[in-house]
Amino acid sequence: MSDKKIPQPVIVVRNLKKSFGAFTAVNDISFCVEKRLCFGILGPNGAGKTSTIKMIYGFSPLTSGDIFVFGLDIKKQYRIIKARIGVCQQDNTLDPDLTVMQNFEVFARYFDLDKKTAIERALSLLKFFALEQRRDARVTELSGGMVRRLVIARALINQPDLLILDEPTTGLDPQSRHQVWERLESLKKKGMTILLTTHYMDEAARLCDEIVIMDQGKILAQGSPQYLISEYTGKDIIEIAEPEDDLRAFFRAKKMRQEDLGHRLIIYTEEGHKFYREICDRFTHKSCILRSATLEDVFLKLTGRELRE
Amino acid sequence: MNVNISTRFMRIWQRNLTVYKESWKINFLPPLLEPFFYLLAFGIGFSGMIGSVSYGSVQTSYLRFIAPALVAINIMNNAFFENTFGSFVRMYYQKTFDAMMATPLNAEEIITGEIVWGATKAVIGTVIMLIVISFFGLVSYPTGILIVFAAFLGGIAFGSTAMFFTGMVERIELFNLPIFLFITPMFLFSGTFFPLTGLPLWAQYFALVLPLTHLVNLVRALSFGLFNLELLISLGYLIVFCLVMFPLAIFKMRRRLIK
């Protein structure tokens, strides 16, 4: 707060830990979120994503470590921090006892905004999120996509400097997801810093400038989506269904990065075309696919393929 | 995090008032009709069998005897049900507290706001009831005005107790337990429908532990216009009860909300 000469990360997380009894949900993680970026926390269920962001927005106390938001210590100055952030939680936390407009008015009071300001901002947010037709509807009458847009809209009533979203599109249909993404992209263009958690790789690839992949409370990898793909999988992927033994032997001999799943062989490579040709020429294998590597490949490679339940 | 309660708790109170105003016509009905039903049942149906009751040194009609008890029971029920079922629904099903916790409000303020709201509902109900029973000449004024303050104090006492249970129960059905073990016995055995002197001595002493006994004493003394020692003891009891239960409610609920 002292001066604005040194650019300061919006969020600094240092050696953060969170335990619930004997269970460690977040195990010694550190990262920074720079201004005006969209930062994604990816991970399977139970990775510690939600526990991490709950500590960042001042909901859960830290077991150990530090969090600074806007350069302020969350342990001491949580009220100032909370007044400057917008939070969109995983559950629908809209007030079902109230109408859409009343939801804004009541929520604005929590931030000490006067009624006139609340109504002005609410109207422009409703417009931005294409909800102005529903201003007098009860929240219970809205569709899933509308509810999610409204939760995000309500989180912006205090004109936050940082928007935190916990799985913003989970459970939405494709149309609604794209609606949400478009709004988030235009917020980003306006200079909003965004922190989000997700387990949708396409969402992270589309929205995030920087990503951490978490599993079992730890950060496994960090970087831009492009960096993570080139670092962990290579440009191309060849997937071969029901590979024969000689095909397996061929790739094993080449000592290439690969994963053998039994019924499926996955080859990570920079020269996909070359090898794809070779397979087609030498092995005449029919169910062989060449495709570009995606974040999903990185994710599965890092976090494994077992079910998390 | 230290316990830190600012006047921001009024934001939660305001939220509940906004919801209350949405359906005020329905909310006004129970305190308006309930005394009618009771006065009808006991005043016409029952009191003919009883005649008069001795309260302290005065002989009084049965109706005048139970009217303040009905007010006290209404205070207890309003606050207790608001801060058990009402608060639990907001906390557990509607996630209203979760949304609040992501704003500058903290857990202590949310709990305080809920309890003060429960007490406010008790006051609203009391005012409506007082107006009704005053038409039957069952309240002495000006002391009767003070019953409004007794309603707030009683509301905080029973609201805090309710919030304490809300911090404990896993499922909403489990509220039947404190209702069955705590609210119903008090409803019957707190000097509400018959004087405590009608009970064996051990039961009289036991009744003195129950908060409703003291709320009934307080409201009854005020509605008869009697400033006696009993009134002061009951007032003191209720204040101490609040000073114990309110922090306990905060403690239990904080452990539930902050994870």
Image: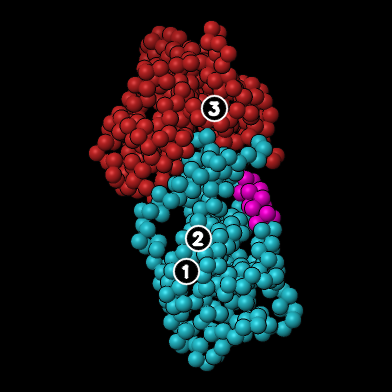
Relative to residue A263, is residue B65 depicted above or below? Answer: below
Residue A274, can we see it?
yes
Q: Mark 3 or mark 2: which is in front?
A: 2
- Residue that mark 2 sits on: B123
Q: Is residue B242 magenta?
A: yes
Return the residue nearer the eye: B185 or B196: B196
Return the residue nearer the eye: A68 or B208: B208
- In the picture provided, is A84 more to the left or to the right than B150? left
Residue B94, can we see it?
no
SS at circle 3: helix
Relative to residue B77, is residue B46 depicted above or below? Answer: below
Magenta-colored segment: predominant secondary structure:
helix
Q: Position of residue A305 (x, y in %)?
A: 52, 31
Q: Mark 3 or mark 1: which is in front?
A: 1
Q: CA distance from mark 1 to mark 2?
A: 10 Å
- Residue that mark 1 sits on: B130
Q: Are marks 3 and 1 on the same chain?
A: no
Dot 3: chain letter: A
Among the chains pictured, the one given red colouring is A
- Residue that mark 3 sits on: A81
Work out whether mark 1 precedes mark 2 in sequence or the reverse, and give the earlier one: 2
Kind of residue at disc 2: Val
Q: Position of residue A261 (x, y in %)?
A: 51, 28
